[in-house]
Amino acid sequence: MSDEGQALRANYHLKWSVIRAMKQRGIERYDVNGLLNDGVTSFKKGFIPVETTMSGTLDYPMSPLYVVWSGLLPAIKRVLRAIR
């Protein structure tokens, strides 16, 4: 998401729609998948009354190209943002 989209809270409607759909289906617990950064964290805390700590996930690289995806791609994104 761009800085402008974050400032406008562009993803709130999508997340809220998912939370409402889950509630209609009788789901009582919705895993918002961790508190990642300021924008996502503030959104999640706005809808989640109690923060629950879970064990987390394990990322297992299934391809040797994972190194490119997880290391090189973020570096390229930083360079491109710096150029803008």
Image (tube, rainbow, N blue to C red):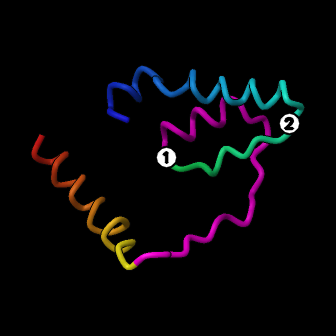
Q: Determine the secondary structure under disc 2.
A: loop
Is residue 83 toward the left or the right of residue 41 in the image?
left
Residue 2, above or below 33? above
Q: Earlier in the sequence, mark 1 or mark 2?
A: 2
Task: Tell me the residue at 57%/26% (across/down).
Answer: 14
Q: Determine the secondary structure under disc 1.
A: loop
Is residue 36 toward the left or the right of residue 51 in the image?
left
Q: Is residue 59 magenta?
A: yes
Where is residue 63? Give x, y as percent: 43, 76
Main SS of the magenta segment? Answer: loop
Residue range of the region highlighted in magenta in the rendering:
37-63
Task: Tell me the residue at 35%/73% (across/down).
Answer: 65
Q: Which residue is mark 2?
A: 27
Where is residue 19? Give x, y as percent: 72, 29
- The quarter holding residue 76 reads bottom left
Q: Which residue is mark 1?
A: 37
